[in-house]
Image: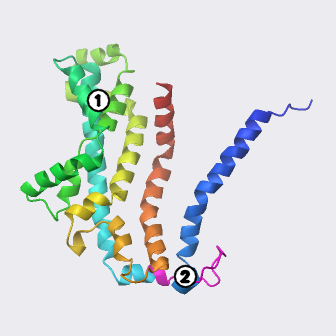
Amino acid sequence: MKRKLDIPYIILFVLVSIGAVIMFLPYLWMVLSSLKGNHEILSGSTNIIPKSITFEGYKTVFKDAPFVRWLINSLISSTLVTVATLFTSALAGYIFAKFKFRGKKLSFLLILATMMVPFQVIMIPRYLIVSDLGLINNLLALIIPNLISGFGIFLAKQFIESIPNDLIEAARIDGAGEFRTFWSLILPQIKPALSAVGIFTFMATWNDYLWPLIVLNDLDKMTVPLALVFFNGQHIVNYNVVMSAGVLIMIPVVIVFLVFQRQFIKGMTMTGMK
């Protein structure tokens, strides 16, 4: 018996596949351009495949700049911000979801309101505060202002609200304190949500350009997004070097996503269901 073709499914699959190819092409072009010589890119050739593969761009990245140091700076700041954000989001989400206190709704609304304020509005006040704390040209200037995420608190709260109160009461009856309940019972239940928050936070911190540009001055303190500006010449752009740096910057983010993609997809799916 022949199986009936699902025409709408086939059409949707074709459209999604076309969209995926269109979105993937710029990244493919960037990787292949990093293997070209700068003269080949500037020649205006429409051939996406390099005529001759060269790794001069990658050699220049590591030879002409402290790129490894920049990678370490980005890795330190992104990791610390992500870990702190996950902890504060889960803890605050637990408090807002399962505790009653005066001003709870107003406090939560104020946290949500922070998600609606553009960064450009708070940029100058944030800079003045960081300057008064003596953190200019310090990696702490990238870490401390980003320890709390309104989106992370919101997502954690939505997940924790689905955990039965009876389960928490049973843990308390068994003698578990509030922190033990939070650490041993709540955190394992919200791993999908935390994975989604973690990936978004890591990507946002890793790719942040404007704030590091404002607060970091020394070459050794810079992060990898600033490398793209560093490799732009004053009179000519070394496109193969810029593309090589872009590929190297992209690799850690891709690795993080591949490692946590199952939890990330599960978290986003459950978020949509809620």
Task: Decide: few, some or many residues near mark 2? Use Cα within 10 Å; few <14, some 14-19, many ≥20.
Answer: few
Q: Secondary structure at mark 2?
A: helix
**Residue carrying label 1:** 93
Q: Is residue 183 visible?
A: no
Which residue range is magenta in the image? 43-58
Depth order, front residue of 114/246 = 114
Q: Residue at x 12, y 54 (%)?
A: 128
Q: Is residue 2 left or right of residue 11?
A: right
Q: Residue at x 38, y 80 (%)?
A: 62
Depth order, front residue of 45/169 = 45
- Magenta stretch contains residue 46: yes
Q: Is residue 147 left or right of residue 29?
A: left
Q: Where on the picture, by quarter, is residue 183? A: top left
> Type of residue at label 2?
Leu
Secondary structure mostly seen in magenta is loop
Q: Which mark is residue 42?
A: 2
Residue 34 image position (x, y, % from top left): 52, 75
CA separation in Å, label 1 and label 2: 52 Å
Q: Is residue 166 visible?
A: yes
Q: Residue at x 40, y 35 (%)?
A: 193
Q: Residue at x 37, y 38 (%)?
A: 194
- Magenta stretch contains residue 41: no
